[in-house]
Amino acid sequence: MKKSYDVVIIGGGIIGCSVAFELAKRGRKDVLVVEQEYLTSGATGRCGAGIRQQWGSMLNATLALESTHVFENLEEYTGYDGDCGLNQGGYLLIAYTEKEWEQFQKNLEIQHQVGINSHAVPLDCIKEIVPHINTDGIQGACFCASDGHADPFHCTYAYAKGAQGMGVEIVTYTKVTGLKVENGRIRGVATTRGDIEAKVVINATGGHAAQMAMLAGDELPIFPERHQILITEPVAHIMNPMVMSFHRHFYVQQTPHGSVIMGMGDPNEPVSLNTKASWQYLEHNAWVVTQTLPAFRNLRVVRQWAGHYDMSPDRNPIINEAKSAEGFITIAGFSGHGFMVAPRTAILVSNYLTGQQDSLDISRFSVERYKTGELLLEPSVV
Amino acid sequence: MRIDEHPVLSFERGEKINFFYNGQEIEAYPTETIAAALHAAGVRKLGESPELHRPRGLFCAIGNCSSCFMIVDGEPNMRVCVMKVRSGMRVEEQRGKGVVGI
Amino acid sequence: MKNRDAEIMICRCEDVTRETILKCIAEGYQTLDEIKRVTRAGMGPCQGRTCRQLIAAELSRHYGMPMEEVMMTTFRPPVKPISLGALADAYEHERTGHKHEKIV
Amino acid sequence: MKHIEVMVIGGGPAGLCAALAASSLGAKVLLVERDEIPGGQLVKQTHKFFGSEKQYAGDRGIHIGQMLLENVIAEQDIELWTDSTVLAIYEDGVVTVEHEGKHTKVKPDRLIIATGAAEKFLSFPGNDLPGVYGAGAVQTLMNVDGVKPAKRVLMVGAGNIGLIVSYQLKQAGVEIAAVIEGLPKIGGYLVHASKIQRAGIPVLTRHTILEAYGNGQVEGAIIASIDETWQPIPGTEQKIPCDAICLAVGLSPLTELAWQAGCAMAFVRELSGHVPVVDDLLESSRPGIYCAGDVSGIEEASAAMVEGRLAGLSAAFSLGYEANEAKALQQSAMEELAELRAGPMGQHIRDGINKVKLKRKIGNHAFENQTEKSGIVKDYSSDATNTCRAEIKTSLINDGIPTKEELDAIYPSDKRLTEGPIAIVECFQEIPCNPCVKACKRGAISMLRDINDVPVVDEELCNGCGLCISLCPGLAIFVVDKSYSGDMALIKLPFEYVPVPKSGHFVAGLDRAGRELGRFEVVRVTSGGDKNKTFTVSLAVPHDLVMEVRGIRIGEQAI
């Protein structure tokens, strides 16, 4: 570790590592990633790692589609010799209310405009996609065959190792304890291993982002919210796609390894950095999922855990350069879908930092939107 | 090989029962675990490991590890070291990951 | 010569050999958590009860670090697998105060 | 949601005693055991326990387990859930249990974690072949299910478990190829080693297993000598044909629930791994959560029982039950523990506990205050280290066979030997055990300071009655009678195998290494009783062999 870097990235999750990689690819190689534990130890390593393109806003649909293209070749793209575990088994979105079904149909139009190969599934064809599903109460369904799931650890390591190969440095078990701001400009970070100077500091700390930004005098509406997941024993292949219901707040999917992984949102979950799992969640998710997939009653849960969503008011990412500290950029607030849009987000941010053109307008993600009211409305989140 | 005479213990085994191992009928006693009954019948390979398909047998005998996973009456991943044998039970070698009956 | 390490089983549940663990350490992974994530060792039904100490010992040996300093991974619930059906019934019971009929 | 005052997780020696102690003070207890039959390791321990009367020394583990279980069942204030596994301890203090197939929630006021230990695994090629077992697994198969695990076994590890299970295998009629041990000395009690040596089972220290081989299951093992750096010495490899390899390489505390509960943990080598940091009353850093038995450090079951009792008392006491009585009972439990740990064999436990104490001082401040609040904490471990204890330095520690010097030192005078029968106690190691002292109605066997001392026989008081032979848990007492006849002397030996010889039979007499010294007539066989199960066999041997013959063999069976 040197005393000074061009860019310091705080947070060794998928966002921090992918940004490091894209920056290095664009020639900004004097980069240090600082991670408080090990890479992926935060939200990335705890997430469901679904990759969904079936979004309801043009922006999210584009981010997701273009990210999916990166995931499809991530090993080659980063030069990684491991397996990122991408499994494109599709996402089956099921609507339990008329209103939801109407929304799905609107979403399809947006998806088609962007070029996503999603389609509506007639009720009598749902079982062809997921044979074990209980179709009672389902009003409609959509499917996108190229949606899927990847291994969050290997994806992050692919970026991290690719970045390291180009000269990026990564330090783990090192905590950022302070930010150095002078004359309205970021100057560096204080860490448990000493002070480091930097021209640009990127805050990719997920649920901790608001706290971190405060150290630079930047107030951001990002809140950590606990979300929980459970996983079953591996069993032989029983289901291809991810099944997801916004109405019932759950998603469930079988990994290539054979385990069935599922998660559930709780509308009453308080804002907190708590990452303890609860028995209430365990029972509730089991109940909800077995209502839709009764045959899963025999599956046995081997593990449950919790992580954070980094929530924003409109449940979309905030990419923001602090007014109080020029050069201090927060990339957070992904509200539960950071993993699946990370590749394209990293490209967007890196293009911005290296002065390159981008087809997307990064300013749309600025925190200014909450003042102007130009929110990034997304109807389809769990 | 059951122990018939022991200097300290006496085994009250109850009535003899039969169960099936890979379809083959095997004698057992209801006081025995499936693993013990199979050992008594000379069967020590209980299955094959999930990825590398290595032969696996009993290891801990107290339900701690996963070495003795077998398919019992169609249900995979059963720890036969702590599961009592029952008359007519169908026990099969588990080769690789279990196939859950749904 | 036969590769001895490929014949040494470290994690029975996930079939992870010593060869895999050592390769992982050689690639620079430093903690049990990372090794668990990259190899799945310790993620199986026994939750690392048998392999955790063996991997910790390998890390201790490789990095010349006393066992006292090898960080343990989190022990996540449940300690024994339990069926979704049993969990769902418990939820149903809390919700309605009586036992839920089994849907098959 | 079920509410209970004291919940005990684990129905082994610690858990059973914890439940009994807490309820004895008036607390309502829920005891949860994952197995069908509570008892933990006691259900398969066919050997007699060491320790003192207070820990039921001299009784076999299985009988102690049955007795404790009967007491638990008879106690109205203890609810017992068997076949029930605790799944998790959550942040809100809720403990989930799989009970009668249901996901059941319990909210205890106090929690005692007594989950015991799991056997350690070892790295060697073929270590997952069918036929490689944990020693405990073999014990379960033999002693619970009554099934022979194999025909010929290689035992890896000469700690107490390795030695005891080897003996039990022999009792079940299984051949033991050898007991191998990586350390330069035997780690278990030497009386256990002596017992198997005279049955003809070699104990090889500084040996390791290089690999297990076999097509689909174990057909043998390759072992070798190792040097000081634990490296195999080329050229010393030996092929050991066997159909089972038993790993008795130690236990590690089963601590996942303590981790989940958020108890402060520390890696303490002397206690065999990560353990919850507890205070003298066994409370963890999480107020209201206590840990007892192997989960907080691997020790003998005798210590686990006392720890369980102490944790149960502490939990009930903290709820306000029988404050005065509880304090005195806690005090005496702590004294018992100190006594059990006072000998050289308890050195590592004392060291380990001292390390935990250190962790506690530098750790959680609130925790430290809480410890002081209890007010009755006294440093017993340093008392124990003050006394001078000697470790065995002769070859006895390597093979379990006493040297001539060691034997000469305990032999009675020639005069006394010719006068009539007298007990010879071949117990050279300071281990916490005293049933022999209690066994002698004449007070002829004594210990100097405490139960860790080696017993001394008063040759004037001893009349050679032989009552002590079948009461010594180590089977280390023999009675020699040189006045038996002009040609022959009588040797009385403890005997725990089948078949039992009958008087008039001729059997092979064996020396301390299991070598045959000749065939001799059995003169008398007396039973130790239905519960004791140890026979005393009297054998007529030539005068010059009476100090050599220490075992017998009937037919091919070395004993």
Image (spheres, coloured by chain):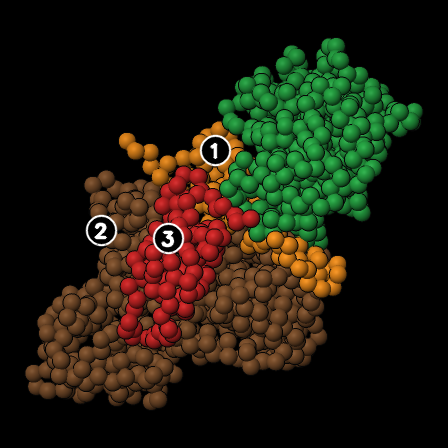
Chain colours: A green, B red, C orange, D brown
Number of marks: 3
Q: Chain of mark 2?
A: D
Judging by the rendered image, the residue that carries numbered circle 3 is B22
> In the depicted view, which residue is nearer to us: D278 or A319?
A319
Q: Tag 1: residue type?
A: Ile
> In the depicted view, which residue is nearer to us: A345 or A257?
A257
Asked if badges 3 and 1 are on one and the same chain, I answer: no
Quadrant (top left, top right, bottom left, bottom right) of the N terminus of chain B:
bottom left
Q: Nearer the viewer, mark 1 or mark 2?
A: 2
Q: Residues within 10 Å of mark 2 (few under 14, many from 20)?
A: some
Q: Nearer the viewer, mark 3 or mark 1?
A: 3
Give x and y (percent) for residue A72. Answer: 59, 22
SS class, disc 2: strand
SS class, disc 3: loop
Residue at point 47%, 79% (across, down): D67
On residue D241, the disc is 2
Q: Is residue B80 shown above or below D22?
A: above
Q: Tag 3: residue type?
A: Asn
Could one spot residue D403 in this view of the protein? no
Could one spot residue D486 in this view of the protein? yes
> In the depicted view, which residue is nearer to us: A125 or A80?
A125
Q: Chain of mark 3?
A: B
Residue at point 41%, 68% (across, down): B30
Q: Chain of mark 1?
A: C
Q: Distance from label 3 to label 1 (Cα)? A: 41 Å
Q: Tag 2: residue type?
A: Pro
Q: Quadrant of residue D479?
A: bottom left
Q: Is residue D462 left or right of residue A106?
A: left
Judging by the rendered image, the residue that carries numbered circle 1 is C25
Give x and y (percent) for residue B99. Answer: 49, 46
Q: Residues within 10 Å of mark 3 (few under 14, many from 20)?
A: few
Q: Distance from label 1 to label 2 (Cα)? A: 35 Å
